[in-house]
Image: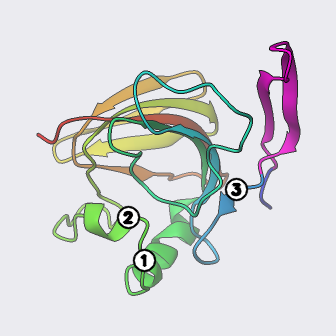
Amino acid sequence: MTRQIRRVVTGHNGAGKSIFVSDGPSPHVFSRTKGSAIVHELWETKETPADNRGNIDAIARGHRLPPPKNGSVFRVIEYPPDSERLAAIAHEQALPDDSGRVAATDRNSPRHPGFHKTATVDYAIVLSGQIYAMMDEGEVLLKPGDVLIQRGTNHAWSNRTFEPAVLAFVLIDAEPL
């Protein structure tokens, strides 16, 4: 069952006073097929420095893997166990997609069908569950509270348990390697 991620967003009223703009479940939740990862898109910036003017929902768009050029994206992803997810990945790779996911996919990796690479610096924080971060060479088991700094490397996520693994990610646009 998909968990709800509560998203509280602040802003300013007409007098310049700080206010809560929204408070509720993230309205931007994406899953391509049954058994696939569930992505909760929470916020994005389109430039650095970010623009804090206005109170519109900055992530009100369809799911897209990379952040905007010179921007960032914040999301939470629920990874089902590989026993469910691997079949979903194989099915998804045949579906049309404009999120940037297909372009990032490394179809030549025999280790895991989820290998992909983006021109980003990613901060990944494990919130619950366990997951293996896989590189072309090597892997490491991450547990709740662990943080991985992913620097534009080819990588995959492998959940070898029977429970979902939930990770928070901040992706920041970077120059390609």
Q: Which residue is mark 1?
A: 97
Image colouring: rainbow
Q: Is residue 12 left or right of residue 153?
A: right
Residue 96, x across and y down, in percent:
42, 84
Nearest to N terminus: mark 3 or mark 1: 3
Residue appearing at x 18%, y 36% in the figure: 175
Q: Quick one: 30 or 113, which is closer to the camera?
A: 30
Q: Amino acid at mark 1?
A: Asp
Residue appearing at x 54%, y 27% in the figure: 51
Is disc 1 surrounded by few (<14), some (14 to 19) or many (20+) residues within 10 Å?
A: some
Q: Amino acid at mark 3?
A: His
Nearest to N terminus: mark 2 or mark 3: 3
User: Looking at the image, can residue 48 be seen?
Assistant: yes
Dots 2 and 3: beta carbons under 8 Å? Answer: no
Q: Secondary structure at mark 3?
A: loop
Separation (CA) of disc 2 from disc 3: 17 Å
Dots 3 and 1: beta carbons under 8 Å? Answer: no
